[in-house]
Amino acid sequence: MKKASTMATTGFVFLASRTISIIPTARAFTLVTPKHAAVTARNRFLSTSMNASGPRQTAIEERLTEAFAPTFLDVQNTSHGQKSDESHFKVVVVSEAFEGTRLVGRHRAINKAVSESDGSLGFHSLEIGAAKTPEEWNQNSNVAPSPKCQGGDGRGMKN
């Protein structure tokens, strides 16, 4: 029987035909809020088959963390062609910074946080799955599934 080696990512161990296989899954990560409380985010989809975030996804995560100090952050690369294109993203941001701000203001703030200095996104599509306060998130943490993109793959090619 083959012994599973230690991996940097999480995975399910699958036993079949007397061999052990690791089936990669999306990794979990931990965010530390300014109050030093750790919150483990739910599994997220990653940009490559090796379960590593691409440079654009990492930049989005860093910008949102810096701007909102979220208690929950989920950034998914939802690019439907090559995941390495990093053309489509879905974000869920839960932060106390949204307290007293209407939904449209929250969305504008998220767009501004991930935009380049010239105001452009730098990628094809940003879907804001949720922008909630921790209290709102505790009452309802449902995030609607993403619609199919009708605008191409971000490289000028149609679906």
Image (cartoon, grey):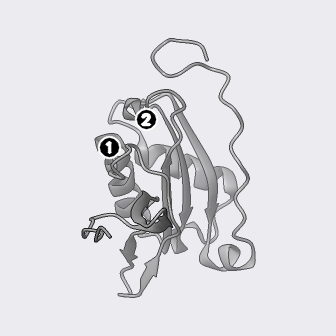
User: Could you say which is closer to the camera, residue 83 or residue 1?
Assistant: 1
Q: Position of residue 109 (x, y in %)?
A: 51, 51
Q: Check disc 2 and report its element: helix, strand or loop.
A: helix
For image coordinates 58% across by 19% down, the residue present is: 152
- Identify residue for label 2: 83
Q: Position of residue 106 (x, y in %)?
A: 59, 55
Amino acid carrying label 1: it is Gly
Q: Would you say 118 lies left or right of 102 here? A: left
Q: Is residue 33 above or below residue 66?
A: below
User: Could you say which is closer to the camera, residue 137 or residue 23?
Assistant: 23
* Residues marked 2 and 1 touching at CB (< 8 Å): yes
Alpha-carbon neighbours of circle 2 within 10 Å: few (<14), some, or many (≥20)?
some
User: Could you say which is closer to the camera, residue 131 or residue 25?
Assistant: 25
- Identify residue for label 1: 54
Amino acid carrying label 2: it is Lys
Tell which tag, 2 or 1, sits nearer the viewer: 2
Q: Position of residue 9 (x, y in %)?
A: 33, 63
Q: Is residue 77 above or below residue 120?
A: below
Q: Position of residue 100 (x, y in %)?
A: 64, 69
Q: Would you say 149 lies left or right of 70 here? A: right
For image coordinates 32% across by 70% down, the residue present is: 1
